Image: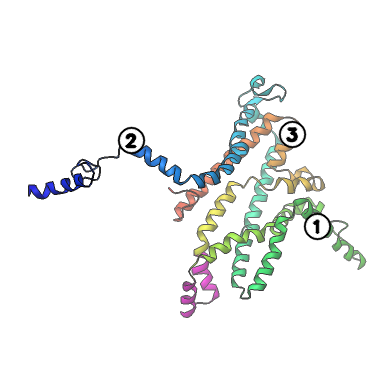
Amino acid sequence: MAVNQALPRVLRTFRGRPPDSPDSPEVPGKQPRPAARAKSFVMRMRQDSPLLLMTAPAVLVLLLFTYIPLLGSVVAFMDYVPFLGFTNSQWVGWNNFTALFQDNLFWGALANTFEITFLQLLLFFPVPIMLAVLFNSVAMPMVKKFVQSVIYLPHFLSWVIIVALFQQILGGGGVINRILATHGMSGFDIMSDPNTFQLLLTSQAVWKDAGWGTIIFLAAIAAIDPQLFESAAMDGAGAWRRFWHITLPGMRPIIILLLILRLGDALTVGFEQILLQRDAVGPNAAEVLDTYVYFNGVVDGNWGVATAAGLLKGVVSLLLVLAANKLAHRFGEEGIYRR
């Protein structure tokens, strides 16, 4: 019995490993030495060096334009004067937030922001999903590629061009009004109507980005096993049942993930798009948080209140992401991070 227990130790010594090596059964649970852990870390760094070099420019851009500018949030607690800088400007504590909450324009901008976000979630978010399902059902590859190319194109146009196109079609002197005038009918001007401005913004966003948003959903559908559709069809399941029981569950993780990301960006509803059309409908209908920050900070020089509004927007967006991600965990999905 003693010989049988000593034999593995002799074999390890013969192979060049000490009897008390970490993988020896005589010392169960022994941790690797710090030098070995450091060596393995250095080896992993060397092995992953090409990938690290590839990600270095993206990390540098994030540091320069995202994380380092976050230090400027201290302006929300200062009576900031650009000529005095951060060191000489006076600290005012929570006074900027008090002034922000007492400003009726801020509450109006916040209400408009949430209303536009709700409309975009209700009318815009489902459109790429439906388009992806329709594209996936097209049998002719040439027709599918042509239609996809056509609806992808508006994504690459600037908001200046898109607003100009809508103005030429729906404006007071647009094509539709000229056609109505030639037939003796009264025209309309949607581009300057405050009551329909939020629907106009949503329709512009759908026309511009709905096709581009189908790319991720098409990839999610392509990842579904085709044998599931074949088996369901052989069992007599129609198109609706295949969509409800196979396609939609296969797309659900991506849908929930994009919904969480959209909620995190809920208070950002298109600064350039709204700024281009703000004068036509007035600030009461078109003022959102981004334009409120721009006009208070850049235009009027009220940097403290503008930064306080921006900081509040970031905090609310973070809370929305955390709440949506927790809700995703309740439905059994991973969300943007695991529990």
Frontmost of labels 3 and 2 is 2
Describe the element under mark 1 as helix, strand or loop: helix
How many angstroms separate mark 1 from mark 2 (CA)?
Answer: 66 Å
Up the image or down, 148 lies above or below 21; here it is below
The x, y position of residue 23, in whole percent, is 24, 45
- Circle 2 crowding by C-alpha within 10 Å: few under 14, some 14–19, many from 20: few
Residue 52 location, x and y as percent?
51, 44
Tell me, for residue 298, which label it has, or none. Answer: 3
Q: Could you say which is closer to the camera, residue 247 or residue 2?
A: 2
Residues 162 and 286: in front is 162
Residue marked by disc 1: 165
User: Image quadrant of residue 167?
Assistant: bottom right
Segment colored magenta: 226-249
The mark that comes first in sequence, 3 or 2, is 2
Residue found at x 46% / y 55%: 333
Residue hosting label 2 = 34
Query: Mark 1 is on which residue type?
Result: Leu
Residue kind at label 3, given as amino acid type: Val
